[in-house]
Each structure stands twice: as structure tokens, then as C-alpha cells.
Image (tube, grey):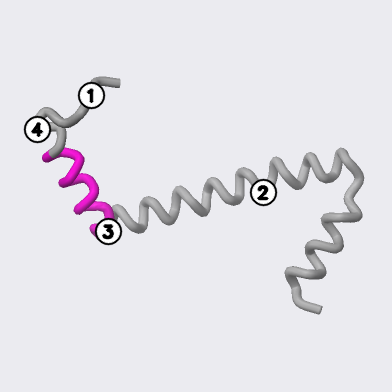
Amino acid sequence: MTAVERIEQEISRLAPDELAQFRAWYESFDAQAWDRQIADDASAGRLDALADGALQAHASGDSKPL
């Protein structure tokens, strides 16, 4: 049995209040991982082309105010 399968089994056994606690913890954990990935991508320049494209679209009038 893999670690993921063991975790899935344990999660399926949680009481409703424990499951709610786990969901809240995992949501925070996942959001932090996403934030780190975005920051790493930005620092490495992997988002530069997207930003440049958005700035060019805005400069040429192809954007709308929010």
C-alpha cells in the first residue's frame, strides 16, 4: 500500500469535525504551496512573457477597465 493510499484510508475514517479541521489545514497548506510556486516562477522570470503580453495589450488599447 502506498503512502497516498494510507492517507486516503485515514481521511475516510475521520469524524465530520475532524474532516472539517483537515480541510481547513489542507486549504491553507495548498495555498501556501501555490504562493511559493508563483513567487518562484516570478523570480525565475517564467512569468515575464505573460506580463509583457498583458502590458502590450493594454498599451494598444486591447484591455478593459475592471
Q: Name the quadrant of the C terminus.
A: top left
Distance between the alpha carbons at the discs numbered 1 and 2 = 36 Å
Distance between the alpha carbons at the discs numbered 3 and 4 = 22 Å
Asked whether 47 falls inside the magenta stretch, the response is yes
Residue closer to the observer: 59 or 6 = 59
Q: Is residue 26 left or right of residue 33?
A: right
- The x, y position of residue 24, in whole percent, is 70, 41
Distance between the alpha carbons at the discs numbered 1 and 3 = 25 Å
Please give the label number shown on residue 64.
Answer: 1
Which residues, given as a range, are shown in magenta? 45-56
Distance between the alpha carbons at the discs numbered 4 and 2 = 40 Å
Q: Amino acid at mark 3?
A: Arg
Q: Earlier in the sequence, mark 4 or mark 1?
A: 4
- The residue at the point 30 percent across, 53 percent down is 42
Q: Look at mark 2 in the image and give the residue it sits on.
A: 26
Query: Do the residues bearing badges 4 and 2 touch, measured as CB atoms within 8 Å?
Result: no
Q: Earlier in the sequence, mark 1 or mark 3?
A: 3
- The x, y position of residue 49, in whole percent, is 20, 53
Of the two numbered discs 4 and 2 in the rendering, the one whose residue sits closer to the viewer: 4
Q: Amino acid at mark 1?
A: Lys
Distance between the alpha carbons at the discs numbered 3 and 2 = 27 Å
Query: Do the residues bearing badges 3 and 2 touch, measured as CB atoms within 8 Å?
Result: no
- The residue at the point 36 percent across, 52 percent down is 39
Please give the label number shown on residue 46.
Answer: 3
Please give the label number shown on residue 59.
Answer: 4
